Image (tube, rainbow, N blue to C red):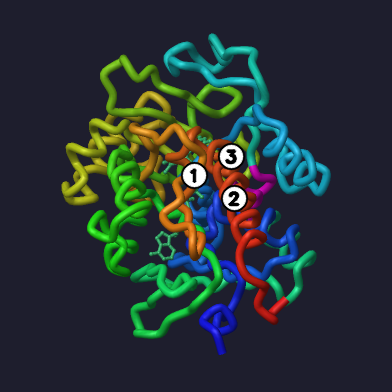
């Protein structure tokens, strides 16, 4: 038996966010089998929705935009199935303008999930499962601890010491995390080319952290329609965003999501959560109706370590190895945010299909 025949599956994809799921679309369409692993219990990565009692809050990405045709096709199909809807055409930049919406810019559509931002990744995953049947599997709560490329196979290691092998692999965690996985698998600059060049590119990526504070309120917030304020980054912070999940149409209860800016989030990353929450609530007072001590009936703080890329790679993917094919992609490649991540995932999926077509025959798993 050759090492190629020993592969469990054609392609392993680390991460079930929008980049990984977009890559899987290309792989499945090409007839390959895909095993997707995510350390989280849910799907969607930073497209994240959480319940707080009866309230529903998007606490990662708040909306997405569509500029390119490839992602546009996915969104149009999801819209047809009512998984995503247009939220609005812009937000105020200064919440003090009042409830009339002030200077809401008449711009391009801002999209949201029907019941929350995870709806889009969930919809993509469900369509893939329908289309591919046993060729597609997502394993949640599966933290990958190492990624190696050796003897024609990509091998993922897990905390329990087990491993999975595949003919190719795609890594979608933020590059600082992917670099750790590669290093644990022996793929460091010392491994020679192309690994060294890939590691050097990946190491240039930088992210801002972000605190996301979710507040359930006893009455509707004072956030002006259509339910979001994007604070001017030059205004001195610490708020970057306040979104009203009830006006947005995803929460039956009054509930807001507050994002701190990168500078505040970095400065207070290790500050006790109660202190961070108190500071952010204090700054958000103008948009809370009444004394926060009474108006806030439930609160929860999420700390995103790698929220938004500040230093990007200009290519849509980085190939770590060609034989076996192994690439990194996600929102730090060629375009940030949800659409950038999806476009990068699609590009990585296409790259892997071509690389495997040039290489050896498929596994028998399809
Ligand atoms: C607070 C916040 C606000 C944002 N606001 C917006 C917005 O309004 N509009 C917009 O377009 N974008 C926004 N973004 C950015 C957007 O969410 C991301 O660009 C996009 O979701 C990234 O998708 P991805 O698939 O590249 O990465 P992710 O969604 O991060 O997916 C990577 C996945 O890899 C998994 N993973 C990581 N390590 C491992 C491991 N070792 N083993 C297994 N799985 C692993 C993670 O669990 C995760 O699910 C925001 C992000 C944050 C955090």
Closest to the observer: 132 or 300?
132
Whichever of labels 1 and 3 marks the residue nearer the N terminus, that label is 3
Give the structural element (helix, strand or loop) at label 2: helix
Image quadrant where one finds the C terminus: bottom right
Kindly identify which residue carries mark 2: 351
Query: Which quarter of the figure has residue 208?
Result: top left
Mark 3 surroundings: few (<14), some (14-19) or many (≥20) residues within 10 A: some
The circle drawn on residue 247 is none
Instruction: List the single residue furthest toward the right.
Output: 80
Question: Left or right: where does residue 131 sit relative to residue 103?
Answer: right
The circle drawn on residue 317 is 1
Kindly identify which residue carries mark 3: 246
- State the image coordinates of residue 265 (x, y, percent, origin top left): 26, 38
Nearest to viewer (mark 2 / mark 3): 2
Mark 1 surroundings: few (<14), some (14-19) or many (≥20) residues within 10 A: many
Whichever of labels 2 and 3 marks the residue nearer the N terminus, that label is 3
Residue depicted at x 76% and y 73%: 133
Closest to the observer: 73 or 8?
8
The reply to whether the C-beta atoms of the residues labelled 1 and 2 are less than 8 Å apart is yes
Mark 2–mark 3 Cα distance, whole angstroms, equals 41 Å
The reply to whether the C-beta atoms of the residues labelled 2 and 3 are less than 8 Å apart is no
Magenta residues (range): 113-121
Query: Which quarter of the figure has residue 183?
Result: bottom left
- State the image coordinates of residue 119 (x, y, percent, origin top left): 65, 51
Residue 112, visible in the rendered structure: yes
Mark 1–mark 2 Cα distance, whole angstroms, equals 9 Å
- State the image coordinates of residue 322 (x, y, percent, origin top left): 48, 57
Mark 1–mark 3 Cα distance, whole angstroms, equals 37 Å
Closest to the observer: 251 or 303?
303
Whichever of labels 1 and 2 marks the residue nearer the N terminus, that label is 1
């Amino acid at each position: 038996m050759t090492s190629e025949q020993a592969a469990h599956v054609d392609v392993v994809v680390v991460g079930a966010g929008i980049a990984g799921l977009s890559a899987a679309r290309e792989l499945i369409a090409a007839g390959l089998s895909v095993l997707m692993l995510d350390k989280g219990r849910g799907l969607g990565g930073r497209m994240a929705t959480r319940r707080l009692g009866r309230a529903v809050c998007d606490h990662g990405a708040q909306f997405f935009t569509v500029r390119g045709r490839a992602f546009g096709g996915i969104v149009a199909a999801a819209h047809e199935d009512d998984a995503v809807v247009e939220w609005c055409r812009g937000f105020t930049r200064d919440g003090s303008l009042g409830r009339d919406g002030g200077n809401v810019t008449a711009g391009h559509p801002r999209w949201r999930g029907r019941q929350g931002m995870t709806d889009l990744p969930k919809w993509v995953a469900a369509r893939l499962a329908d289309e591919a049947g046993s060729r597609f599997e997502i394993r949640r709560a599966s933290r990958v601890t190492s990624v190696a490329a050796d003897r024609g196979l990509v091998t993922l290691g897990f905390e329990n010491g087990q491993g999975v092998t595949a003919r190719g692999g795609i890594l979608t965690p933020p590059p600082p995390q992917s670099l750790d996985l590669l290093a644990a698998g022996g793929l460091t600059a010392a491994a020679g080319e192309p690994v060294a060049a890939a590691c050097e590119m990946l190491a240039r990526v930088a992210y801002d952290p972000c605190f996301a504070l979710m507040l359930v309120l006893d009455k509707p917030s004072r956030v002006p329609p259509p339910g979001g304020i994007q604070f001017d980054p030059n205004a001195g912070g610490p708020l970057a965003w306040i979104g009203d999940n009830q006006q947005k149409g995803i929460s039956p209860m009054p509930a807001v999501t507050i994002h701190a800016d990168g500078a505040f989030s970095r400065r207070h990353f290790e500050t006790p959560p109660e202190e961070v929450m108190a500071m952010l609530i204090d700054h958000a007072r103008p948009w809370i109706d009444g004394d926060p001590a009474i108006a806030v009936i439930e609160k929860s703080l999420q700390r995103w370590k790698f929220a938004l890329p500040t230093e990007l790679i200009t290519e849509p993917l980085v190939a770590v190895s060609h034989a076996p094919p192994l690439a990194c992609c996600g929102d730090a490649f060629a375009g940030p945010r949800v659409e950038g991540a999806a476009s990068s995932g699609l590009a990585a999926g296409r790259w892997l299909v071509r690389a495997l077509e040039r290489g050896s025959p498929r596994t028998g798993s399809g």
